[in-house]
Amino acid sequence: MLQRNKSLRTLDLRYNELSDAGVVCLSEALMLNTTLHSLVLWECDMTPAAAESLSMMLKANCSLQQLD
């Protein structure tokens, strides 16, 4: 759904316990998203492994301007 969404500009998931698996799934979906500009992930209970997944997503996603 996030991969093909054309209207979502901001996604605020702060204070959600996404865990590593959730962040990996989110990162995979956002690799193909071209409209999201802002992603908020404060206090989402992730480890360095999840951060690595986000890093890979940022290399592929050129539309994301803010990661908080």
Image (cartoon, rainbow, N blue to C red):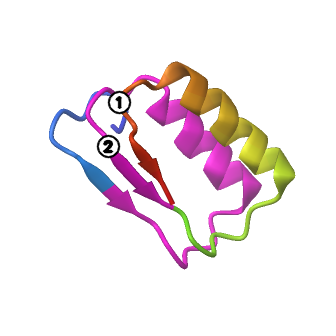
Q: Are marks 2 and 1 in contact (CB under 8 Å)?
A: yes
Left or right: 55 in relation to 5: right
Q: On the rendered image, what quadrant is the N terminus found in?
A: top left
Disc 1 crowd, CA 10 A, few/some/many (<14, 14-19, 20+): some
In this view, 10 is above or below 60: below
Q: Is residue 3 left or right of residue 4?
A: right
Q: Which residue is mark 1?
A: 63
Out of 34 and 63, give the one closest to the viewer.
63
Bin the neighbour count of mark 2 within 10 Å (Cα to Cα): few under 14, some 14-19, many 20 and up.
Answer: some
Q: Position of residue 2 (x, y in %)?
A: 35, 38
Disc 1 residue type (three-letter): Ser
Residue drawn at 35 percent across, 57 percent down: 11
Q: Which residues are magenta?
A: 11-40
The local secondary structure at tag 1 comes to: loop
Residue that carries the numbered disc 2 in the rendered image: 37
Residue 24, picture quadrant = top right
Q: Give the secondary structure at mark 2.
A: loop
Q: Residue furthest left?
A: 7
Q: What's the residue at 49%, 26% (across, down)?
A: 31
Q: Name the residue at the right extreme.
A: 48
